[in-house]
Amino acid sequence: MFSQSEENYIKAIYHLSSVSEKGISTNAIAKKLETKASSVTDMVKKLSEKEVVVYKKYQGVTLTDFGKKTAANIIRKHRLWEVFLVEKLNFSWDEVHEVAEQLEHIKSPKLIDELDSFLGYPKRDPHGDPIPDKEGNLPQIQKSLLATLEKNEKGVCVGVNDTSSEFLRFLDKQEIGLGQNIEVLDREPFDDSFLVKINGKEMTISNKVANNIYIQKN
Amino acid sequence: MFSQSEENYIKAIYHLSSVSEKGISTNAIAKKLETKASSVTDMVKKLSEKEVVVYKKYQGVTLTDFGKKTAANIIRKHRLWEVFLVEKLNFSWDEVHEVAEQLEHIKSPKLIDELDSFLGYPKRDPHGDPIPDKEGNLPQIQKSLLATLEKNEKGVCVGVNDTSSEFLRFLDKQEIGLGQNIEVLDREPFDDSFLVKINGKEMTISNKVANNIYIQKN
DNA sequence: AATAATTTTTAGTCTAGACTAAAAATTATT
DNA sequence: AATAATTTTTAGTCTAGACTAAAAATTATT
């Protein structure tokens, strides 16, 4: 059994691992968790004791298989709760994150199994991210950043990179959402912006935005 | 905003207050929370600082109006989550307590309002206890312990005193549940047991059990 | 290769919330 | 009313998890 604090570290390391592939630095973890590197060093030693991570001084940290499974389980809970909030409690996708941060720490296997069943075994959370199964397997869908599409390529919006309320509310305002068809009509070299057709509507999209929308090509 | 620990103290004091009416002793609180009186003294000073309780050394503790409202809010959350677990997630009434103990600490007014609405604004939790409204008002129904009924008195089972899984599972086994009609056919002076008819079925009930079932007389 | 800059760890503190043992206050008993 | 028993508080510790400042190690730069 892990404390909330330990769980937050495990989750942070997991998320950082999916980007960098090799040892995660204490600094990177500190930044993600808005804490200090010295606090991270302490915690990482503790997690190493508990066989959650492998840690060698000055070498950064990697999750063990046990650690990965633990992380997947926390993320499973987080994402299932997000689905619940949006589908059942009228939350919008930009409101769910901080509540799910709390709910993910609730300890009860029955609760989460029943919730999964109650929600109809959803495969994705409201931001398009896949929900790990009970064993911690996370179906990896292949998706591309909108920013990587060439002129005339088409696809469906399947996820977002930035999940901040600011970005999500921006998408709502632009009426951009999951499941919509997107076609790149043109790319503007001057500012790397995109002329796209989203759900039949033409619009210009900045490079920053294009770097935060995931597309499944078709 | 209160810590989980502070919330647990507030809740404990609230529950003890409904029994005793006057200053709650640190010892009583310690017993309820399975901690030591010295720890309680410390916490009670802190809660007094925060205007949640009135505390005079050696005089016990009483909740302020603010404290009562805070307590009612925690209990509201606890009981709404219990309804959710039973109605939506197939928990039985003896399984909900410890999960609700965790869920009651989740901080999100929207969450709890939406949950209330999603559940259809329930008035009672699965054990028959009333759910405080948003303002902290708790509709007090008048109910009597089965043990206080005279021969030939009748009523409906509306609640339980002991909410331990052991007792609740015992009631399940005896097929005794909320909403059922109960009639006292006879009282046995020898062991203070009761001969009752519950839902048409005659049975003998010990004094201990009769002291843990609430009846609304009719 | 030596030095400078950066990152990471160590050593020492702090706070919340628990604990034990002893002291102080209250309540019960003679 | 004095003493005994009980309850409550105080004083001092401990642990988890945070922090700062300094030391040590690593990495980058000349």
Image (spheres, coloured by chain):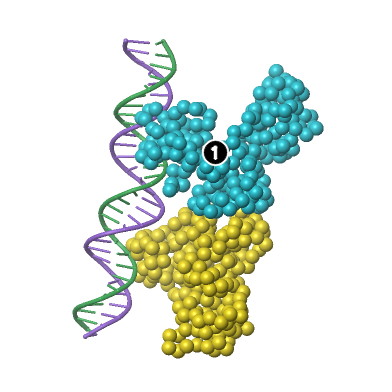
Chain colours: A cyan, B yellow, C purple, D green
Q: Quadrant of residue B78?
A: bottom right
Q: Is residue A47 above or below residue B214?
A: above
Quadrant of the image for the C terminus of chain A?
A: top right
Q: Is residue A11 above or below residue C17?
A: above
Query: Amino acid type of disc 1?
Result: Asn
Spot occupied by residue A115 in the image (x, y as percentages of width and height) = 59, 52
- Between B124 and C7, the one nearer to me in the picture: B124
In depth, the one of A114 and B125 nearer the eye is A114
Tell which of B92 and D3 is nearer to you. B92
For disc 1, the marked residue is A137
Left or right: C19 in relation to A118? left
Q: Is there any visible trace of residue B137 in the rendered image? A: no
- Judged left or right of residue A169, residue D30 is left
Q: Is residue A207 left or right of residue D26?
A: right
Tell me which corner region of the image, top left, top right, bottom left or bottom right, holds residue C8.
top left
* Residue at the image position 70 percent from the left and 37 percent from the top: A178
